[in-house]
Amino acid sequence: MVFEDAHWVDPTSRELLDLTIERVRNLPVLLIATFRLEFQPPWTGQPQVTMLTLNRLDRRDRSTLVAQIAAGETLPDEVVDQIVDRTDGVPLFVEEMTRSVLESGVTPLGIPTSLHDSLIARLDRLGSDRRVAQIGAAIGHEFSYALVHAVSSLLEDELRAALGRLIASELVFQRGMPPDAVYIFKHALVQDAAHDSLLRRPRQQLHAQIAEALENQSPELAETQPELFAQHYAEAGVTKKSVAFWGKAGQRSAARWR
């Protein structure tokens, strides 16, 4: 069992995690929970729990990672030094900044100074494919081919080609094959960067389109996952519908605890 990013856990999921860790004490179960240092779990020190602290990469490991990502393409020592210095030992930042440099061929002065800047730069270089990434980001960390197809104005061949290039860039991964494929962003920060790159009005319109497509494709979700519609309508600025779905979600949650 894997619980990723437990520092973002909601209270109900936190209760489930705490209970599960207690219950698996005498069971043949391997449970892995990843979290940042600010998260303080109550199960630290319990006999069935082992804590493993992952430190930032040192300079040698950063340089090694840069070389591995470059895959035989030689980068000037000055560029490697800049990547090593600016990434602060964060593996994802090392990887994304190296890919950004390889894609753009920038000089040391043009290397992005933050992970967010690096991700935005990579998205910008996608050209028209960035729109597909933005649609996926508005849908969620995972998004289906069917829903992207319903929301985008691309022909099927164009959409498949665009998704193929996103996969080649390693910003998203694919599970299954179209039209039943599901795509997953490499990291939540990639999704956030793609979503944040949308201007306010287009972002609202996109979320409204997603909510309408969901209602057309899977009307049963309005009953089983009303919070999904509530969130999209809230992002779209459609307050009346958002409030109605949040109300339905609250009623479903309350009913489960009676």
Image (cartoon, rainbow, N blue to C red):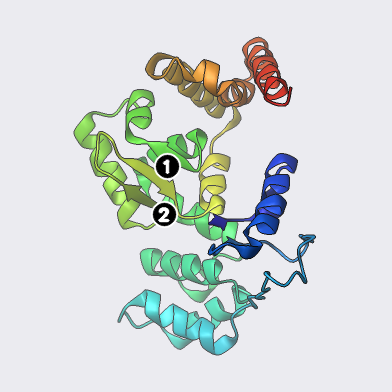
Q: Nearer the viewer, residue 251 or 238?
A: 251
Query: In the picture shown, does residue 31 fall above or below 159?
Result: below
Q: Nearer the viewer, residue 57 or 217?
A: 217
- What percent of the width, then of the height, locates residue 42? 80, 60
- What percent of the width, then of the height, locates residue 242? 64, 17
- The circle drawn on residue 155 is none
Question: Label 1, label 2: how many angstroms apart (C-alpha)?
Answer: 9 Å
**Residue at which label 2 appears:** 171
> Looking at this rendering, what residue extends furthest in the left direction?
157
Please identify the quadrant where the C terminus is shown.
top right
What is the three-letter code of the residue carrying label 2?
A: Leu
Q: Is residue 62 left or right of residue 145?
A: right
- The circle drawn on residue 133 is 1
Q: Nearer the viewer, residue 103 or 232?
A: 232
User: Helix or strand or loop: what does disc 2 sit on?
Assistant: loop
Query: In the picture shown, does residue 143 fall above or below 52?
Result: above
What is the three-letter code of the residue carrying label 1?
A: Ala
